[in-house]
Amino acid sequence: MFRTVRSCAVALPTRASTLRAYHSINLINTKPTEDYNPKTKKLLDAAMDLVPSLGFTDQALTLASRRLGYTDTTPLVLPEGPLDLIVYHLRREREKLAVASETAPADPPAAPTTPDFRTKDQRLDDACHELIVQRLKGNIPVIEHLDNALALMVQPQNMAESLSELGALSDEIVHQAGHRSSDFDWYTRRASISAVYAASEVYMCQDKSKNFEDTWKFVKSSLEARRGLQEGVGNVGQWVSFQGIASVMVIRSLMTRL
Amino acid sequence: MARHALSKAEASFITKLIRVDQAGELGADLIYRGQYMVLSRTKPEIEPLIKHMWEQEQHHRRTFNELQQKYRVRPSLLTPIWKVAATGLGCATALLGQEGAMACTEAVETVIGGHYNTQLRWLHENFPPKEERSKDEEITSLKSIVKQFRDEELEHLEIAVENDSHEARPYWLLTETIKAGCRGAIWVAERV
Ligand SMILES: [Fe+2]
Ligand SMILES: [Fe+2]
């Protein structure tokens, strides 16, 4: 552990070097989809294959169940149907992000030929940008159904679960981007990234540009707009007055993390 | 070792352990820093003693910061408040003089030492040495950290008593108030 800390202090927290040092799976942390029983997971995976054509629907679950030769009552283990499928999509995509980092190349990237004049915050933002884009690309296969999914997720009875998933995703992004904190900015970073991510996902739903170029630009400008606000904020009250009351809900959801 | 080797309750206990100990060691670091700032001027002869304890607290704090980051435990949301409270407590008791500072140390270390003891007992009960999963490196290292820190907190307690903590006036009111405050802070930091 000590070796890791020292190597981070010398080398910039480039993704490859920090990521390999910290495993997302250890004594306390599990993979996002690890808690599903294997049969349910298989059903959800099969249903996800049908989502591009059938959407996040009960039909997708029923058809997947039949194809697997399960009884027609099997999908009943997922009483929420469409919502369970959406939540599974969120967890599976978050897991892909975590796994991608673990299998990242071990060698640190070659020294840059031009000097790096970016500030620490800029480097962090650039790493977050890359990760947010990577995660949003996971929505492309289901993009036709994303607006329906979002509409379901923001219904009051589903809000707690949606926010908790959003909080977990922002934790994964901020951690992988190399941010290490034992202080209050642990929360502010995650809440900012949550806000940027949520806005970008909504933007992506209506993006008609080629290969979602506009969405990637939107992510970048949103991160830049927030960077100014991050600096010099020392306490809860100050921060909340900058970020608005929605951020309080995100913080509350971050607290549900073990 | 993956978490599925731990029950949900066990993972949750260890998470809280890391969060509350991190907040506690942050507090300890700042209490001693406050005392050092005052006493290095008013009472230079005990400066080395305070420094010795302060350096141990800094090591404790660094260790739990590393554990919190490694295990991706969220820090206490009230971290900014713990900082203000601990600095204030350290300075205020040191302004009462050496006896006041030592009474503060005695009270704080009594509660913290006891708290580490409770955690150590839990670790030994849930991970008895003969069990296979207790041999996991992450578990053995956590046990030895908690044990070492408990011993050092109790050493601080002894130093405080040897250096006239009981001479502080009003001794009882001072130590009992601080103890109650620490117990309250532990309760809150585990949850928030
Ligand atoms: Fe300590
Ligand atoms: Fe101590």
Image (cartoon, rainbow, N blue to C red):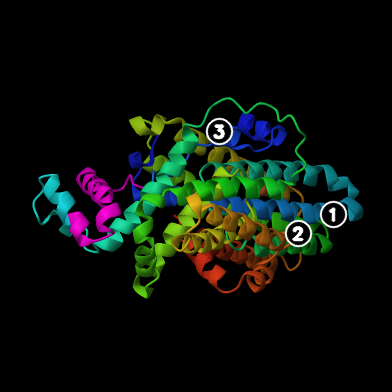
Which picture quadrant has residue B102?
bottom right
Reply yes or no: does residue A55 show up in magenta.
Answer: yes
Give how far apart the Cα atoms at labels 3 and 2 are.
Answer: 37 Å
- Please name the residue shown 51% across and 32% down the image: A104
Q: Are marks 2 and 1 in contact (CB under 8 Å)?
A: yes
**Quick check: B40 left or right of A56?**
right
Is residue B160 visible in the rendered image? The answer is yes
Q: Which badge, 2 or 1, comes first in the chain's sequence?
A: 1
Q: Helix or strand or loop: what does disc 1 sit on?
A: helix
Name the residue type under label 2: Gly
**Quick check: A126 left or right of A165?**
right
Quadrant position of the N terminus of chain A in the picture: top right
**Chain under callout 3:** A
Residue behind mark 1: B37
Name the residue type under label 1: Met
Is residue A77 visible in the rendered image? The answer is no
Which picture quadrant has residue A149?
bottom left
Residues in magenta, as a range? A32-61
Residue behind mark 2: B90
Mark 3 packing: few (<14 Cα in 10 Å), some, or many (20+)?
some
Give how far apart the Cα atoms at labels 1 and 3 are.
Answer: 37 Å
Residue A249's spot in the image, x, y percent?
50, 69
**Chain under callout 2:** B
Mark 2 vs ligand 2: CB below 8 Å: no
Q: Helix or strand or loop: what does disc 3 sit on?
A: helix
Say how many tags the image has: 3
Residue A9's spot in the image, x, y percent?
70, 36
User: Residue B136's mark?
Assistant: none
Give how far apart the Cα atoms at labels 2 and 1 are.
Answer: 9 Å
Mark 1 vs ligand 2: CB below 8 Å: no
Mark 2 packing: few (<14 Cα in 10 Å), some, or many (20+)?
many
